[in-house]
Image: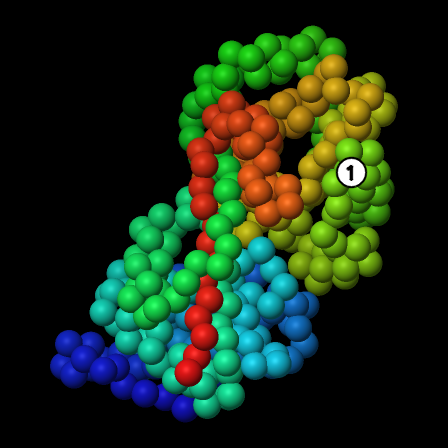
Amino acid sequence: MSARTNRGNQHEQYEFINGNLPVGFKELYELSLYNTLAHRELQSRDNWHSYHIIRRDKKNAIASIHFCVKKGVAHSPYAAPFGFFELWSETPASLLFDFIAYYESELRNLCTKRIVIKSYPESYHTHSHNLISVLFFNHHYIISNAELGASLSIDKDLFTDRIDPWEKRKLKQALKAKLRFEVIPNRNIKKVYQFIRACRNERGYAISMSLTQLVKTIQKLDRYFHCFGVYDEDQLIAASICVRESKNNLYNFYSAHGKESDSLSPIVFLISELYTWCQHNRIKLLDLGTSALGGIPNFSLIDFKLRLGASPTMKLTFEKELK
């Protein structure tokens, strides 16, 4: 089903549609990993409903959003760090405002009672994140959850020029101990996962994915995942599993180190090397993730990330009851 916009001649060249994009149409935005068909099928094998703003004469799409509808609730995403809109940077705000009303009407036709949308961190696309947030408020969405995270912008500066003097001393200590950083092939994911899980268990932290789930995901989306390790001689003392969510963003999904290596501060060394790896791979943002304990910000962990030169960022979940 499709619909013209509600603003007459102002945007008459644009059209709202649901389902797959017509054959031959090009998206004027980069799809983040979690909104790709491959990842959505990992989240849920069915019940997906996609909505787009298209221009037929140009054969392109300027915005899209995907929902998995189950038990009367429309989720974006169903099981991923975020879903939210994919958006061409020049999409008019008035068009987006009408688009929200359009997909809400379509979801009502599916007997949807509630919409839940989890945004990407605000630092990914600050302009569009803030624009959409205001439009959601205009459409009477509420914020049901707010998470505090930290993102490290990647530029030509040296990592040592970005960090707090205390963390710089820790980094010098790690370099003096001759710690070694390595890229670990994804075929060794079981070893890396088990190491990280053991470290988190040691500190009383849970891990969100099972090994089976992670292996299944990497088997289907191998090129998006990258594993890294820090070694003291031949012993693995810190590790990270990262996700390249888009061309410009690397997400430090899981990282950990054992208590016995606390004195070496291997995580500071690890982040330093990830920063350099991002520079070499033309990545603009290293997402250090959200930090919470029992729904409350883990302030000591947030402070640590900020001392590494990261900036605080918010990640919001929007909800609306449909009547």
Q: Is residue 243 left or right of residue 139?
A: right
Q: Secondary structure at mark 1?
A: loop
Q: How many marks?
A: 1
> Label 1 neighbourhood size at 10 Å, few (<14), some (14-19), many (20+)?
few
**Res 264 quadrant in image:** top right
- Residue where numbered disc 1 is placed: 204
- Above or below — where is 212 with respect to 69? above
- Above or below — where is 296 with respect to 161? below
Q: Is residue 254 left or right of residue 289?
A: right
Q: Quadrant of the N terminus?
A: bottom left
Residue drawn at the location 69% of the way across and 19% of the way down: 265
Measured from the top left, where is residue 321 in percent x and y? 45, 75
Residue drawn at the location 30% of the way across and 59% of the way down: 134
Q: Quadrant of the C terminus?
A: bottom left
- Above or below — where is 82 with respect to 243? below
Q: Is residue 234 left or right of residue 25?
A: right
Name the foreground residue: 94 vs 15.
Answer: 94
Q: Is residue 277 left or right of residue 105?
A: right
Residue type at numbered disc 1: Gly
Name the foreground residue: 309 vs 201.
Answer: 201
Measured from the top left, where is residue 181 in percent x and y? 70, 26
Does any portion of residue 115 appear in the rendered image?
Answer: yes
Measured from the top left, where is residue 303 in percent x and y? 53, 27
Residue drawn at the location 72% of the way across and 60% of the way down: 217
Name the foreground residue: 62 vs 60.
Answer: 62
Name the foreground residue: 48 vs 295.
Answer: 295
- Display colour scheme: rainbow
Measured from the top left, where is residue 18 in percent x and y? 44, 83
Does any portion of residue 120 appear in the rendered image?
Answer: no
Residue drawn at the location 77% of the way across and 33% of the way down: 203
